[in-house]
């Protein structure tokens, strides 16, 4: 969803008066609220993997009354193309996939060599089929007000008197994306020793990792290490991230949010690669070991050792954070 903002920006550049509505899952509304290009968010009434033909037809009936000119369909599934088709939107644009070319009337054949990154594939749908893309694609950039930052900090009892390092130790994809808690704790301890504070962000599922990180830190220093996992909405997390001085993250959704907020960011890569979905920002340090067995793109290490993460020295990340100051 963060990378989709590059498409939204491209549409706004191409059509300055565009009225852009985004049909998306309810969880993404707080993220889309920080994208000024989006006029309206329409909640998707059907869950992931659910066909829900009745719900799709009902929503399509409402959308038909709004008289949209075009629908751009980002997922490659057949189901994702049904609502624009039911709504009889005149131009329905998307990449060919799952035998859906008969319900997408502007169906494109994807040239993966020409569009190697996901953001390329999104932005290309703003242009006529085959047209050259701009050399510099617009990057995601989330907008957060000072008032919103302050409100969330007050709600959680936080302040910004000391420099803030945000840690994002989670990764929904799987364990093969997650740098060990012990390693995160060494980076946190180094930041704390320089008179900073640490905020750990993530979902409730990341709570055990956050607690491990804090448990490895000297008790006196750990008083300035705050476990915020499971305590924030997505909107809260965006506001807190916007207040950070630096961020360390696995390859995750929060990593993309940090990049879109233009935060100095060190990203640890294990089983995945920045080649397809990199953080789209300038002040980014990619930290990886480039082992022969990685990237494998597996959720669990097929060799059983996860050396691509376990052997990645925290000193590499600390050095990367220092080098970001000079970039």
Image: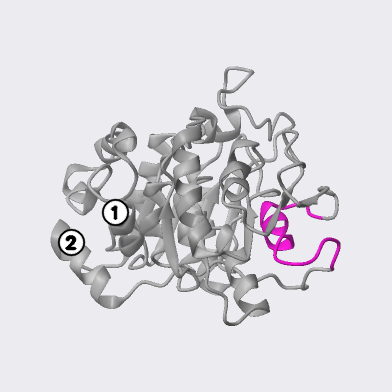
**Residue 116 inside the magenta-drawn segment:** yes
Helix, strand or loop for disc 2? loop
Per the rendered image, the range of residues in magenta is 115-131
Which residue is more in the foreground, 322 or 79? 79
- Residue 211 placement: quadrant: top left
Q: Residues within 10 Å of mark 2 (few under 14, many from 20)?
A: few
Q: Is residue 299 left or right of residue 211?
A: right
88 w.r.t. 100: above or below: below
For the point 68% across and 30% down, which residue is it? Answer: 296
For the point 59% across and 28% down, which residue is it? Answer: 307
Q: Visible in this render: residue 281?
A: no
* Numbered mark located on residue 158 in the image: 2
Mark 2 touching mark 1, by CB under 8 A? yes
Which residue is more in the foreground, 309 or 65? 65
Q: Earlier in the sequence, mark 2 or mark 1?
A: 2
Helix, strand or loop for disc 1? strand
* Numbered mark located on residue 188 in the image: none
For the point 32% across and 58% down, which residue is it? Answer: 235
């Amino acid at each position: 969803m963060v990378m989709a903002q590059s498409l939204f920006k491209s549409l706004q550049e191409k059509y300055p008066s565009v009225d852009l509505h985004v049909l998306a899952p309810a969880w993404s509304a707080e993220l889309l609220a920080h994208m000024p290009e989006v006029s309206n968010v329409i909640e998707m009434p059907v869950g992931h993997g659910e066909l829900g033909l009745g719900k799709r037809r009902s929503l399509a009936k409402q959308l038909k009354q709004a008289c949209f000119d075009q629908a751009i369909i980002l997922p490659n599934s057949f189901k994702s193309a049904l609502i624009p088709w039911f709504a009889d939107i005149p131009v329905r644009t998307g990449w060919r996939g799952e035998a859906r070319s008969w319900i997408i009337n502007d169906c494109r054949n994807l040239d993966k060599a020409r569009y190697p990154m996901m953001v390329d594939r999104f932005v290309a749908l703003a242009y006529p089929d085959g047209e050259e893309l701009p050399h510099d694609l617009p990057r995601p950039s989330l907008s957060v007000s000072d008032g919103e930052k302050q409100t969330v900090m007050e709600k959680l009892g936080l302040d910004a008197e000391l420099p803030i390092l945000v840690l994002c130790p989670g990764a929904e994809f799987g364990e093969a994306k997650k740098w060990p808690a012990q390693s995160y704790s060494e980076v946190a301890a180094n930041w704390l020793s320089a008179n900073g504070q640490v905020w750990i962000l993530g979902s409730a599922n990341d709570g055990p990792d956050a607690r491990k990180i804090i448990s490895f830190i000297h008790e006196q220093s750990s008083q300035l290490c705050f476990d915020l996992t499971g305590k924030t909405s997505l909107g809260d997390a965006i506001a807190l991230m916007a207040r950070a001085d630096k961020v360390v993250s696995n390859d995750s959704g929060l990593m993309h949010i940090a990049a879109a907020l233009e935060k100095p960011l060190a990203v640890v890569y294990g089983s995945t690669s920045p080649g397809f979905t990199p953080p789209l920002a300038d002040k980014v340090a990619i930290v990886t070991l480039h082992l022969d067995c990685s990237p494998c793109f597996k959720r669990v290490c097929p060799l059983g050792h996860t050396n691509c993460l376990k052997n990645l020295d925290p000193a590499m990340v600390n050095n990367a954070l220092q080098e970001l100051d000079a970039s």
